[in-house]
Amino acid sequence: MKKVFFIFFLLFIGTLNAQQIALLKYQGGGDWYANPTALPNLIQFCNTHIHTAIDPDPGTVEPTSPAIFEYAFLHMTGHGNVFFSEEAQENLRNYLFSGGFLHIDDNYGMDQYIRPELEKMFPGKELTELPAEHPIFSSAFVFEKGVPKIHEHDLKRPQAFGIFHEGRLIILYTYESDLGDGWEDPEVHNDPENVREKALKMGANIIKYAFTN
């Protein structure tokens, strides 16, 4: 088992240089496929503005698959139920503990489901709100107040939470922000250009931070 895991780890390190990202296809019935144009647009923005070399075609991967080790960054979104089997939990933990990064973006309605799943996956670790001074908010573009508000739902302030392992941020959970909606094609939500730009810049910050920390 250790030998197999080491091979996956080597694949992961090699992929970091290739800069590939993927959408996480989780179980539970939630719409993991929400915001289909979001990641391609974010990739294009990052490749243009922060000089990444990300494959323009993001992958799709299940949490139980060894293929997650082929990606430097995983993105997860949706509105509904989330379920991680024990196999999925173990695979995701191994991925994250060996250098991977997971961004979870609540597309409105995921919060009540994702929090218990994270508690099961990481007993003893808590979601911690990131202060505005955290470097993820200034890795490429400066957001003095932290994660920006893109779409309004319940008149709550946007928040960014993290789970850390050995001092490293391994999961970023953005709540009441809806970054992914802001990454979508302009005609999907008809957001003003300055709102889309804020979302894309914050997304670029997350990508840059994940690739360099």
Image (cartoon, grey):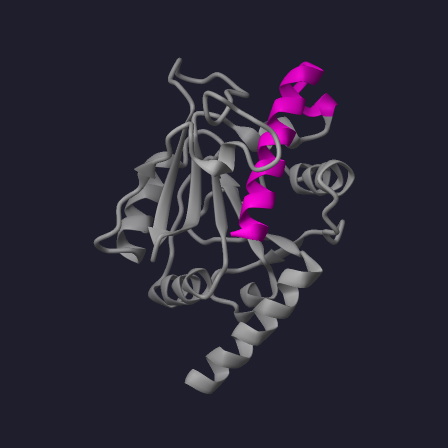
Which quarter of the rendered picture does the N terminus lie within?
A: bottom left
Q: Which residues are magenta?
A: 186-213
Q: Nearer the viewer, residue 127 or 111?
A: 127
Residue 62 % position (x, y): 53, 60
| Residue 41 in view here | yes
Residue 69 % position (x, y): 55, 67
Write the residue at 67% across / 31% down.
184
Q: Is residue 184 above or below residue 104?
A: above
Residue 204 % position (x, y): 63, 37
Q: Nearer the viewer, residue 167 or 155?
A: 167
Q: How many numbered circles does the render carry?
A: 0
Magenta segment includes 198: yes
Location of residue 207 by image quarter: top right
Q: Which SS type dominates the magenta stretch?
A: helix
Q: Nearer the viewer, residue 44 or 81?
A: 44
Magenta segment includes 94: no
Residue 28 % position (x, y): 41, 50
Write the residue at 31% across / 57% down.
121
In-image side of 9 versus 70 (left or right)? left
Location of residue 85 by image quarter: bottom left
| Residue 191 in view here | no
Q: Is residue 191 above or below residue 83?
A: above
Q: Is residue 9 above or below residue 159?
A: below
- Extreme residue in the left direction: 124
In-image side of 162 versus 200 (left or right)? left
